[in-house]
Image: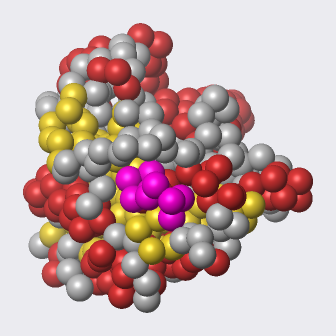
Amino acid sequence: MLDIKFIREHPEIVRKDLEKRNEKEKIEWLDDLLKSDAEYRKLLQDNQKLRQRRNEITEEINKLKKQGRDIKEKVREAKELPDKIKQSDERIEELKNKIEYYLMRLPNILHESVPVGKDANDNIVVKTWGEKPKFSFELKPHGELLQELGLANFEKAAEVSGHGFYYLMGDIARLELALVNFAVDSLTKKGYILVEPPLMLRRKPYEGVTDLKDFETMMYKVEDEDLLLIATSEHPIAAMLMNETIEEKQLPMKFVGFSPCFRKELGSHSIDTRGLFRVHHFNKVEQFIFCKPEESWQFHEELLSNAEGIFQKLKIPYRVVNVCTGDIGTVAAKKYDVEAWSPRESLYREVISCSNCTSYQAVRLNVKYRKGEEKEYVHTLNSTAIATSRAIRAIVENYQQKDGSIKVPAVLQKYMGKKVIGKRE
């Protein structure tokens, strides 16, 4: 969330940013937040004076008694003070809750380079890479082909678990492991530390990493437990330093996380319903960085470069888009999406999301670093390295052969021990 000090000192920056996002309701929130914050701070001062007066008046009454003087007025004042303090405490708590409500829901301040737009159609293409493959035959949907080859079973998964789940078998399951190992190897060689995080988080740290309004409708909750299944390893990795102050020399801290991810949202049912693009469970390798504020924009480009490098080595054509104000969500200050080429549909589909969240998560999680005698909030950044289900779909489509087999990308062949999978004898 935004630091309340920043909002007090720069309300017009926040207001202009909300206007850019077309967040009319939250502009009204901002006015009420500033008014409530001013009242809250004044009440805190007044409340402290009331408590100080409560201590003073006891001494004054004792002095008057010793002097044999009238204490009626002082006694009356003393009797009134507890009720005044109680009323003040109640109002302070009410204002505190209101301020926290607004702060937890106001979005991050956008970088000046974020394009203004209503939805994904207004995202700006900043780069296109790779030569699109040409086919002399009609491509089969990836799910249909995998099932025909005995490499996946969507019907049985739907029967035992519901739609949006899948069985991967044989060489396609090995291909998934190859993708994970390839991505992890690529990043650990660059100094990223491998993390396998908890697959469940309590609500408090989860509210620290994201606006649950954005995620809660697609998250799985453990019944009768204060636990949510993670939607991405970004979230538990960010929470790893909750309420900690680290030394400046420890920054940057670079991690590569691997985990299953769980999401209720299935998305469109019109495309490849037997498939791997939008599913309830998938495995993902994620990049995450904690860094000093002045370094975060260079690391944003580094994360993007790492992700692009993986898809370039896979030789999957893609494009990079700068995500617009209407599509960016609450937490990121700027976000790139990498979209892989889908030759069967002749369009690009998202496979990577790369975000600079500046201090937004750090303020919510209370993650700081020591800068001399002062403490400052760190910046946090995240990016997909490989979401295996989407990468598998891209490989199956871009490497599909006329006989129904699938070439293994050259960079994965050492992990697979073969150059082709699904070849019929």
- Residue 330 position within the rendered picture, expressed as x and y whole percent measured from the top left: 42, 35
Q: Quadrant of the C terminus?
A: bottom right
Q: Depth check: 275 or 147 in front?
A: 147
Quarter of the rendering containing residue 247:
bottom left
Whether residue 54 can be seen here = no
> What range is drawn magenta here?
397-405
Q: Is residue 286 above or below residue 21?
A: below
In this view of the protein, which residue sits in the foreground, 318 or 374? 318
Rendering colour mode: secondary structure
**418 lies left or right of 109:** right
In front here: 6 or 252?
252
Image-based side of 343 in relation to 48, left or right: left
Q: Quadrant of residue 251?
A: bottom left
The chief SS type of the magenta part is loop
Quadrant where the N terminus lies? top left
Q: Give above or below for 231 relative to 248.
A: above
Q: Residue at x 69, y 58 (%)?
A: 147
